[in-house]
Amino acid sequence: MKKLLLVTLLSTLTACGSEDIFDGDDQNDETEIISSVTFTHQASDVNSPLYYFDGTYTEDGQVYTQDDIAWHWAVYLDGAGQVATLHPEEDPQYQFLEANTYRIKATVLDTAGDELDSYSQDITITPEQIDTTTLKPTAIINIVSVNGLNVEFDAQSSTYSEGDISEFEWIIEGASYSTPVKAHTFNQSGQYSVSLKVKSVDGTEDSTTTTVEVSAEPTEPVADFTYTTINLVANFDASSSSNISSNIDSYNWYFPHDGSSENGLKITKEFPAEDGYSVSLTIISGEGIEKEVIKTINVSENAAYVTCDILTSSHTLYRARDEGQCFTSIANGPLTTFSSANAWCDAQIAKYKDQMSRIFPTNLTSEIRQQGNNECAEPNEL
């Protein structure tokens, strides 16, 4: 019985693959896939910084179209890394903004997003090319709303100074859409790249890419704001606040120094005097989740150079000498607050008193003025 079983097993092996097992041929019978990526580039004019690219992907001698593969283009610059991402197509356009040598890399991906092959080439842009004006539209992506996995994109802010924009093309999750406003539901939570190409009536193009992160579950918003000041007036902007899973529905500002409050993404507030003030911002997401941030801001009058005049002395013999002293902050730069001016002037008086103490102690007072109202005729330096 054992011999019969062994004979049967050997017969099976020989029938299924005897040539590989017994003939000593170690050759790998798997077919090797030979692929290549190439692209050509050409300036839109003889001496223009706007370039056209045209990519080709072949596999085992067969040319594949954009229906079967996905293209990823990137522009690199030594020292700055990646500086731009081109529209994901076979033949994108790109306008260089500075004279330099750039590396253009084209990567081909399969439908699952796995890299098949890539190719890169250097292009040198000259100052003469940068000086050549090339008019083209500007592609702009605005994210109108976010609600879970649902996002609405708007390209209607895209502009062209020479005419109208005639075509819009979105690339979202590998699919193409041709409307100026596009609502899209992503497959799952994560970060996605969204590309937009616009074409004008005269055929010029521009493209841009943005990244959007979506979440199927409610996330905690991040409250933040920036501000600028003009004298005692501060302009507040809460655009740096963010939330992944939904829009931010409200922006609530509170000012403890006077108990006032305001609502809005951007607001303006005037403060009563030079000082540091606490400012609170509370944001509320679409799911009703609140987040607060508190910052201390400083407002002041116009920055100015300051003079410090010695006014009186405790000894009549030295009154005239003391009152002739005048110090200016020009060497230290303009002073922005009354407290910093006071501190600077006190330091000048302390130095002067230290010098005078070799003669006798003096008690001095001073007056601070903005430069221009009472400039020093001959500023002193201690």
Image (cartoon, rainbow, N blue to C red):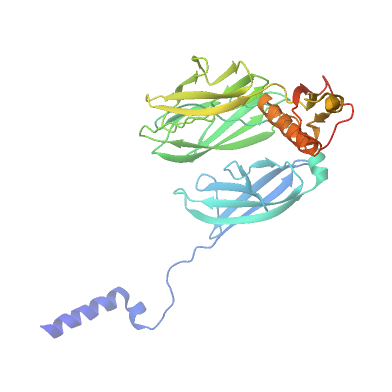
Identify whether 123 is placed above or below 136.
below
Which residue appears at 86% of the width and 28% of the height? 321
Q: Quadrant of the N terminus?
A: bottom left
Q: Nearer the viewer, residue 204 or 159?
A: 159
- Give x and y (percent) for residue 284: 42, 24
Q: Residue furthest bottom?
A: 3
Q: Nearer the viewer, residue 60 or 228?
A: 228
Instruction: State which quadrant residue 316 falls in.
Output: top right
- Residue 46 visible (yes or no): no
Instruction: State which quadrant residue 357 falls in.
Output: top right
Identify whether 187 is placed above or below 299.
below
Q: Residue furthest right?
A: 377
Identify whether 101 is placed above or below 200.
below
- Residue 148 visible (yes or no): yes
Which residue appears at 70% of the width and 54% of the height? 122
Q: Nearer the viewer, residue 29 or 154?
A: 154
- Give x and y (percent) for residue 354: 76, 38
Q: Is residue 244 left or right of residue 368?
A: left
Which residue appears at 53% of the width and 60% of the height? 60
Q: Nearer the viewer, residue 313 or 95?
A: 313
Q: Is residue 349 left or right of residue 74?
A: right
- Give x and y (percent) for residue 279: 52, 23
Q: Quadrant of the C terminus?
A: top right
Numbered disc total: 0
Identify whether 37 is placed above or below 289.
below
- Give x and y (percent) for residue 137: 68, 30
Q: Is residue 288 left or right of residue 346?
A: left
Q: Residue furthest left?
A: 1
